[in-house]
Image (cartoon, coloured by chain):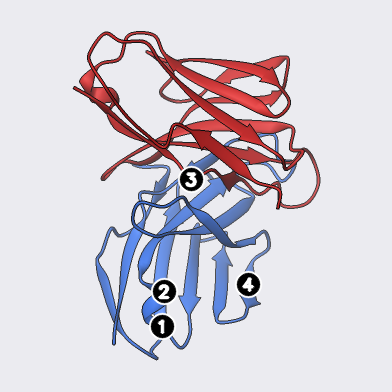
Amino acid sequence: QKEVEQNSGPLSVPEGAIASLNCTYSDRGSQSFFWYRQYSGKSPELIMFIYSNGDKEDGRFTAQLNKASQYVSLLIRDSQPSDSATYLCAVRRSNFGNEKLTFGTGTRLTIIP
Amino acid sequence: DADVTQTPRNRITKTGKRIMLECSQTKGHDRMYWYRQDPGLGLRLIYYSFDVKDINKGEISDGYSVSRQAQAKFSLSLESAIPNQTALYFCATSAGRGGANTQYFGPGTRLTVL
């Protein structure tokens, strides 16, 4: 079982709709969860992070965490063509930054105009 | 702007050659990391350093070595390059304790080993 699993996609979503990206992780000791966006040939850039169970909103993006189910998701509202990218989920065991990040392989998202 | 830079951005080399990839940062971060990215395999950690005197192996360190010359500089070396080291290499940095300890990535180096 991979430590961090994501559906590789591609996930196609019409412009203006909600895109839902999912990630599961195997280590119950994981404490911090990150979503990165990566355009083709470019470096990953942080979208948001979440520590606590529940939802965290930042503009059009909402991260959802359920530690009991070992599940974290990213919702993108009002999807735009510029949201077309690969989205990487990353997990860290400690809250104190002493542990490395483990990345999933990413979900490729395509927004259809 | 505080930034993470990598040189070179692209490199084509031959099997057996020694290659050095360099990373510099102006973010003032203590922690630096080297990753490689391959299609279908995601980002995998090669080495990481939490300060100048601290170097740690990641999950795929075989065939690689690193040097932390200063807080702002972290170099990755391939002593004798082989074709399966063809990949996209990223350097990343993060602050020490406190906050999200978010990792910030450089622009990447595309390495091709023939």
Name the image quarter holding the N terminus of chain A: top left
Q: Residue at x 48, y 67 (%)?
A: A73
Question: Could you give the CA–CA distance between mark 3 and mark 4, rounded to whole angstroms?
Answer: 33 Å
Q: The blue chain is which one?
A: A
Can you say whether B50 is above or below B14 in the image?
below
Q: Are marks 3 and 4 on the same chain?
A: no
Q: Which chain carries label 1?
A: A
Q: Residue at x 35, y 49 (%)?
A: A105
Q: Which chain carries label 4?
A: A
Q: What's the residue type where badge 1 is placed? A: Gln
The number of callouts visible is 4
In this orientation, which residue lies closer to the viewer: B94 or B56?
B94
Tell whether label 3 touches label 2 (CB within 8 Å): no
Local secondary structure at mark 1: loop
According to the image, label 2 marks what residue? A83
The image quarter containing residue A83 is: bottom left
- Residue B92, position in %: x, y? 57, 39
Tell whether label 2 touches label 1 (CB within 8 Å): yes
According to the image, label 4 marks what residue? A54
Question: Could you give the CA–CA distance between mark 2 and mark 3, rounded to whole angstroms?
Answer: 19 Å
Q: Which residue is drawn at 44% across and 41% down?
A: B108
In front of the other: label 3 or label 4? 3
Q: Chain B is drawn in which colour?
A: red
In front of the other: label 4 or label 1? 1
Which label belongs to residue B38? none
